[in-house]
Image: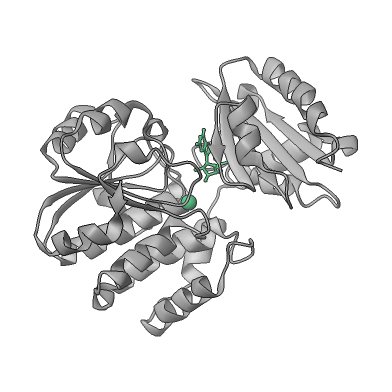
Amino acid sequence: MQQIQEFYPQLDIPKKVVITSHQKPDGDAMGSSLGLYHFLVQLGHSVTVISPTNWADFLDWMPGIKNVIDFERFRDKSIAIINEAEIIFCLDFNILHRTKHMEQYLAAANCTKILIDHHQQPQEEAFTYGISNTYKSSTCEMVYDFIVESHHPDKISLDVATCLYTGVMTDTGSFRFPSTTASVHKMIAHLKELGLQHTPIHDNIYDNFLEDRLRFIGHALSNRMEVLYEYNTALMYIPKADLVKYNIKTGDTEGLVNYLLTIQGMKLGAIVIDRDEERKWSFRSKGSFDVNTFARTHFEGGGHANAAGGRSSDNIETTVNKFKQVIKQYESQLQ
Ligand code: 5GP
Ligand code: MN
């Protein structure tokens, strides 16, 4: 993978561009994809954003999202666009299999591939150019840097600003996590000077759910949480029946894991959700407990030191029991 700066001279030559991110894109994945989309369109590129899967309804207000293609719904069309692409941007993931069924088509595409990402251990050999910086708050911050460093700050339109703010806000826990550096605040100050309205973005993302979801959270906190005080760990497991009963959709469970760390003294929060094709884990930690390594070692996953995910093909009881067993190895680290 060559340095992303080597690619800058090619930015001004209009090309057929595809932008993609990880499956079930979150605010940062969708924000960085659409922020980059609005930027590249202004430079005259012909740009298509393809999401590997569907996304949460609370992202549907984002400028440009109506043009995003869901690979799983429009597979043939997506494959044709990928095969025609001259440049593919891969945002907010480190490893091609995070794009699920798109992986094989991205791997086979014979074009320039560019990575912009902040996850650990990137699959560098898969990309022509790229930047991977695990100290960055978000991929949206990195797309902002990309625009500014390639000498196009004048192309930060309100749409670009709105999309990029969204991902910085969601990936920093609303400017709270240690990744919220002075550079993040300077970036946001710049976006504000350009006219960004931030309050509607917070409302659209965080205050935009149905009653069912709040009742589901109440149920999960009351009935599906275990606190393992000896390991300073809180665990939650959501069986399929709960998802059906409360009509839970993509995105409705996002953020649930964060409640676990609101209990005094907790160092590790873990939640597993019984999805159709797999049991999906989310891990969050405070302090030095490294959930990226934990997820990689035990649950086929990865991510960041304090926020990671994983999966299991076991049933939910089996994977929960496995968690309770493996956590014993970490007793001293969690105390
Ligand atoms: P979440 O728990 O919100 O799904 O994910 C937390 C962080 O870990 C995100 O940055 C996400 O991209 C990453 N992540 C989630 N699941 C996986 C996984 O299975 N593999 C890897 N490498 N990263 C993941
Ligand atoms: Mn991110």
- The picture places residue 200, in percent across and down from the top left corner, at 47, 69
- The picture places residue 237, in percent across and down from the top left corner, at 70, 29
Residue most toward the right?
230
Q: Quadrant of residue 157?
A: bottom left
| Residue in the foreground of this view, choosing between 63 and 161 | 161
Residue most toward the bottom?
193
254 sits left or right of 32 in the view: right
- The picture places residue 258, in percent across and down from the top left corner, at 68, 48
Q: Quadrant of residue 240?
A: top right
Color scheme of the displayed model: one colour
Q: Quick check: 218 above or below 83?
A: below
32 sits left or right of 167 in the view: left
The answer to whether residue 147 is seen in the rendering is: yes
Q: Residue at x 13, y 45 (%)?
A: 86
The answer to whether residue 60 is seen in the rendering is: no
Q: Residue at x 78, y 25 (%)?
A: 324
Q: Residue at x 45, y 62 (%)?
A: 166
- The picture places residue 321, in percent across and down from the top left corner, at 75, 19
| Residue in the foreground of this view, choosing between 201 and 124 | 124
| Residue in the foreground of this view, choosing between 219 and 4 | 4
Q: Residue at x 87, y 43 (%)?
A: 335
**How many numbered circles does the render carry?**
0
Image quadrant holding the N terminus, namely top left
